[in-house]
Image (cartoon, coloured by chain):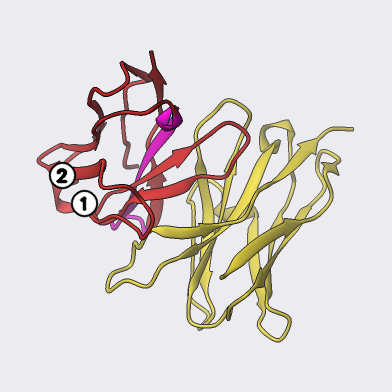
Chain colours: A red, B yellow
């Protein structure tokens, strides 16, 4: 089955840029969605279809997708961005959703 | 504003069937895909399956043999049944709505708060 691999953790200083990768075989041919999950809360959609932002999500959150890697970029990181982040795709070969392994973002 | 609320027993015995309901408020249940997702403590999200109110369903291949989903459009709620549960099914269970898109794999734009289910005798 399709596998999405994320780094377990990313650390970033306030005001700097965090980049979270999501690796998958030819992921560039799929639409990737990204979710933010804070402790004890449900996930929140922050980027969909590779690079679109839902209403209410700051422009600091952006996404890209090419080849075997999709990337969520958080610019001008704030303390409130500290959370787990998950990528997601629809696997057309077996008609089911796959989530990535998750990345914990720590703001130093 | 659409909101989702999961409900059901917090404790299920091994080998029995886990049953959960997701109630949709503030909007219609019709003409959307609705999914169930679970998350064991400290672990990643796992998609369980989804259905469309037109009748179409898709399930995670790893759970397909044990999963049943149904909908009651008159009451604006939908349900999940997971049979023959074991301790490995202990998790927070979420329901979520797929936002409209022109392809099969749209993003989940609205999530319930989640409900904790423990499998134990």
What number is the disc on residue B111? none
Q: Which mark is residue A51?
A: 1
Where residue B60 appears, x then y in whole percent?
Answer: 49, 52
Q: Residue at x 45, y 31 (%)?
A: A80
- Residue under the image location 35 percent in, 55 percent down: A94
Q: Can see residue A24? A: no
Pointer 1 with pointer 2, Cβ within 8 A: yes
User: Residue A105 falls in which quadrant of the image?
Assistant: top left
- Name the subunit of mark 2: A
Q: Give the answer, above or below, for where A95 lies relative to A10.
A: below
Mark 1: which secondary structure? Answer: loop
Q: Judge by depth and name the residue closer to the eye, A66 or B121.
A: A66
Nearer the observer: mark 1 or 2; the answer is: 1
Residue on which the image places disc 2: A65
Q: Residues within 10 Å of mark 1 (few under 14, many from 20)?
A: many
Q: Is residue A78 magenta?
A: no
- Residue A86 forms part of the magenta stretch: yes
Q: CA distance from mark 1 to mark 2?
A: 8 Å
């Amino acid at each position: 089955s399709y596998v999405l691999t994320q780094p377990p953790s990313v650390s970033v200083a306030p005001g700097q840029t965090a980049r979270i990768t999501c690796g998958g075989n030819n992921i560039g041919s799929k639409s990737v969605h990204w979710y933010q999950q804070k402790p004890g809360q449900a996930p929140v959609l922050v980027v969909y279809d590779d690079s679109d932002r839902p209403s209410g999500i700051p422009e600091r959150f952006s996404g890209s997708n090419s080849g075997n890697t999709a990337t969520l970029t958080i610019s001008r990181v704030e303390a409130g961005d500290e959370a787990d982040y998950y990528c997601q795709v629809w696997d057309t070969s077996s008609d089911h959703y796959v989530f990535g392994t998750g990345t914990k973002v720590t703001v130093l | 504003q659409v909101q989702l609320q999961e409900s059901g027993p917090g404790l299920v015995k091994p080998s029995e069937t886990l049953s959960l309901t997701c109630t949709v408020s503030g909007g219609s249940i019709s003409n959307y895909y609705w999914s169930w997702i679970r998350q064991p403590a400290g672990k990643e999200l796992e998609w369980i399956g989804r259905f469309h109110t037109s009748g179409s369903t898709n399930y995670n291949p790893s759970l397909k043999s044990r999963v049943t989903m149904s909908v009651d459009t008159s009451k604006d709620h939908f349900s999940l049944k997971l049979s023959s549960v074991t301790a490995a099914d202990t998790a927070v269970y979420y329901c979520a709505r797929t936002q409209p898109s022109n392809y099969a794999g749209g993003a989940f734009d609205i999530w319930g708060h989640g409900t904790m289910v423990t499998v134990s005798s």
